[in-house]
Amino acid sequence: MGQAHTAEWLAVGIRQDLDSLKKWQSMTYLGVGRKSNPTDYNPLDKSSILVLNQEFYYRLHKHWQSSFAVSYRRQDEYADRYPYEHEDPAFEQEFRAYGRFSYVLENARFKFVPTFRQEFRKFYTPTFTREAESFQLRSRVRLQLTLNLDAAKVHRLIISSEQLFSASKLSAPSQWTGLAYHESRFVGYYSLAPKSLPFIFDVGYMANRLGTTSPSYVHYIALDVIWKNPFGHRTTQRTHVGNLE
C-alpha cells in the first residue's frame, strides 16, 4: 500500500474444491485496505487499495503445488508532502497475472511451504492511459510455516517471511530498470476453522520493510474470512492454501 506508519487489510473469499480428489481448487477474494498518513498512526485514516483476485490451485503431487491467477487492483496515490492529499490523477489501476510453484512438507504437527511466485504487473491511469512505469516483472520468494495447535487442526499459527525483487519497463525514457530487491514482508497469523462452520477466520500482523539503505516499516493488521465450498464437495478435512495476500 506504499508509505505509511500503519495500515489495515480486510478480505473475504470463497475457496471451492473443483474435483472430488481435491487436486484443483479455486480461490476468489475481494479485499480492501486503508492506511495512516506518514505523520500519524491511524490505520483507517485514508483509503488505500481495492483488490479483486481469482486464483486456481493444482496439486501436482503430494509435495508439489502450483497455481495461476489474475487480479485487478485500484490503488490511491497521495502526495509525499503535508497535507498528503490525493495526487492528480488520484489513483492508479493495475492488472496482474501471476503463477506460484510450491513445495509442501507436512505432518500432523506442522506444514512447511517454500514458494516461488512470478508476477506480471501492468499499470494504467484512471482513464486507461499509460503510466510512467508501463509494466513490471516481480519475483517473490516466501518461506511459510504452519503450526497445528490441536489434533483437529481447528487452531493454527502461520508465520512467513517473503522477499520481493522486481524490474520495470519505463515509458519515458523507454528503458528497463535492473532487477533488484525492494522489500520484505514478515507475517504472523492466527487461523481458526470451527468444525461447525464452513468458514476459516485468519487474524494477523505484517511488518512490511521497504527499501534497502534507509528502510522504512509499515505495520499492518489484517482479517481474512474464507467461505469453504459453498457449491459442494464439502468434507470434514481442512486444507489451507495460504493467506489471501
Image: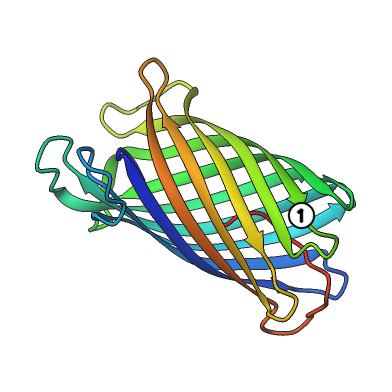
Q: Nearer the viewer, residue 155 or 220?
A: 155
Q: Position of residue 76 (x, y in %)?
A: 26, 52
Q: Which residue is mark 1?
A: 149
Q: What is the basis of the colouring in this image?
A: rainbow
Is any part of residue 77 visible from this angle? yes
Identify the residue at the far top of this view.
Answer: 213
- Helix, strand or loop at disc 1? loop
Q: Position of residue 235 (x, y in %)?
A: 82, 78
Q: Position of residue 133 (x, y in %)?
A: 33, 37
Q: Position of residue 105 (x, y in %)?
A: 85, 43
Identify the residue at the far front of this view.
Answer: 150
Depicted 91 relative to depicted 180: above or below = below
- Taking the spot 83% from the left edge, 64% from the top edge, the residue there is 23
- Taking the spot 85% from the left edge, 75% from the top edge, the residue there is 20
Is any part of residue 103 visible from this angle? no
- Taking the spot 48% from the left edge, 22% from the top edge, the residue there is 180
Quadrant of res 219: top left
- Taking the spot 30% from the left edge, 40% from the top edge, the residue there is 4
From the viewer's perspective, is 161 left or right of 146?
left
- Residue type of the residue flagged with mark 1: Leu
From the viewer's perspective, is 40 left or right of 158?
left
Q: Nearer the viewer, residue 167 or 21?
A: 21
Q: Nearer the viewer, residue 215 or 118?
A: 215
Q: Nearer the viewer, residue 137 or 66?
A: 66
Identify the residue at the far left of this view.
Answer: 83
